Image: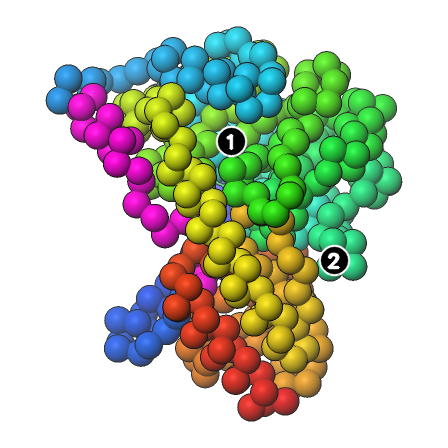
Amino acid sequence: TKKLANRVSTLSPSTTLAITAKAKEMKEAGIDVIGLGAGEPDYNTPANILEAAYASMQEGKTKYTPSGGLPALKDAVIEKLKHDQGLDYSRAEIMIGIGAKHVLYTLFQVILDPEDEVIIPTPYWVSYPEQVKLAGGKPVFVDSTSSSQFKVTATQIKEAVTDKTKAVIINSPGNPTGMIYSRQELEQIASVCQEKDIWIISDEIYEKLIYGTEQHVSIAQLSQDAKDRTFIINGVSKSHSMTGWRIGYIAGDKEVVSAMTNLASHSTSNPTTTSQYATIEAYNGPQDAVEEMRKDFESRLERIYPQLVAIPGFKVIKPQGAFYLLPEVSEAMEKTGFSSVDDFAAALLTEAKVAVIPGSGFGSPNTIRLSYATSIDLLEEAVSRIHSFVKANW
Ligand code: PLP
C-alpha cells in the first residue's frame, strides 16, 4: 500500500536547511566552514524579555491559554499596530500563532480551495509555495530580477490574475531580496487588488530591520479598502531576536481570523504560554535592543557590501532591509565554469569553505543568498574566501 498521502508527495525539502546541515557536518568533522546560511539574528533575546518569561513561569502561568492567544498579548499587538502603523484593530481581528510561518500556514488552510491561485513574486521565501500547495492551492510566480530591483510591478500582478486568483503575497522588506516596496508602488498594487478583488497577504516580519533613509509602509495603511483586504503577518522572531520562541500574529478580516482560531483549537491549541508572556514584554517593554540590533546589522552591511561588489562577476544591489545579500552571479558562474547556482554553491562550500544558499530554492536561478547575521570578522573572512575562489577559477 501507498505510504504517503498525495498532499506531501510534491513537498520539496528546504534548500536552506539542506546546506546548513551539510555545513554543520563539515564543521563537526573539524573543517573550518563559515556559515552564511542563517535566517536568524545572532543576538540573544533581550534580557528584559527573558526575565518576564521566567517571572511568568514562577507565577504559575504555565497552563493553556485561549487558542488564539492571551487577550493581553492581543492587546499588546493592537497597541503596536496603532503605534507603528496608525491602524486600528479589535481583538477579534488578531490571532497569535506559532511563529509567522505557522500563521501563514493556517491562513492558507482557511482561505484556499483546490486550484485557487496565489500570486507569489520571485525571488520568494521558500515556504510560500509549499504552504500554498499543502492547502491544495496553486502558486503562480511573477518574476523579478536585479534589473527590476527584485520587485514586481502592479502591472505584472494584474497580468497574472485569473478568475482563480485568491491572493497576492507582498513581503517587504523581503527575504531573500532585502528590498522594500515604496508607498507609491504599494498604492499601485493595492489598486490592482481592489480592481480584481483579491486578498493581500503582507508579510512584514522584517519590518524593524530597515537601513539608510528607507521607511516601512504597510499596504494596509493606504486606504480602508486596502486594510479590509490585507492580512498583516508579523512576529517577534526577527525584530526581537526571538526565533526559537515561536510567536507570530495575523491582523485582518475577522471571519477569516475566527476560522483560523477554530482550526488552531483543533490542531495546536495555543502557542506556548511562556512565549506569549515573553512577547507581551517584547511589545510593551523598552525597544532599545531592537534599534541596537538594527544598527549593528546596518554597520555590517556597510562594511561587507563594498567587499562583495568587488568580487569579479558579482552584481549586487544594496539591500534596504532584512539581513541578506543576494548577488546575481551569472557572469562569475560562466567565467568559472559552473552551469547552475546549485553547483556553484556546492563548490563554495567544499572548496572555499563558505556556506551560502543557492537562489534556485527561491525561484531565482542566478543568485546566491548570503546572510549577514554573523560577526563582522567572520563576514569579512567569508567574502575574502569567495573572492579568492572566484579569482582562482576565472
Ligand atoms: N516570513 C519570512 C519572509 C521569513 O523570512 C521568515 C523566517 O525566516 C518567516 C516569515 C517566519 O518567521 P517565524 O519565525 O515568525 O515563523
Classify mark 2 as within 8 Å of ligand 1 or not, answering yes or no: no
Is residue 128 rendered to the left or right of residue 328?
left
Residue at 30%, 15% (x, y): give it: 65
Q: Helix, strand, or loop for circle 2?
A: loop
Three-letter amino acid code at the position of disc 2 = Thr
Is residue 375 rendered to the left or right of residue 258?
left
Q: What segment carries the magenta color?
A: 36-57
Work out which quarter of the rendered image holds the C terminus and state it: bottom right
Residue with the mark numbered 1: 234
Front residue of this view, candidates 15 and 74: 74
Residue with the mark numbered 2: 145
Three-letter amino acid code at the position of disc 1 = Asn
Residue 316: tell me if it is visible: yes
Q: Quadrant of residue 344?
A: bottom right
Residue 271: tell me if it is visible: no
Residue 133 point in image, percent of width and height: 60, 41
Is residue 298 rendered to the left or right of residue 319?
left
Say above or below: 164 vs 222: below
Residue 56 inside the magenta-drawn segment:
yes
Front residue of this view, candidates 313 and 246: 313
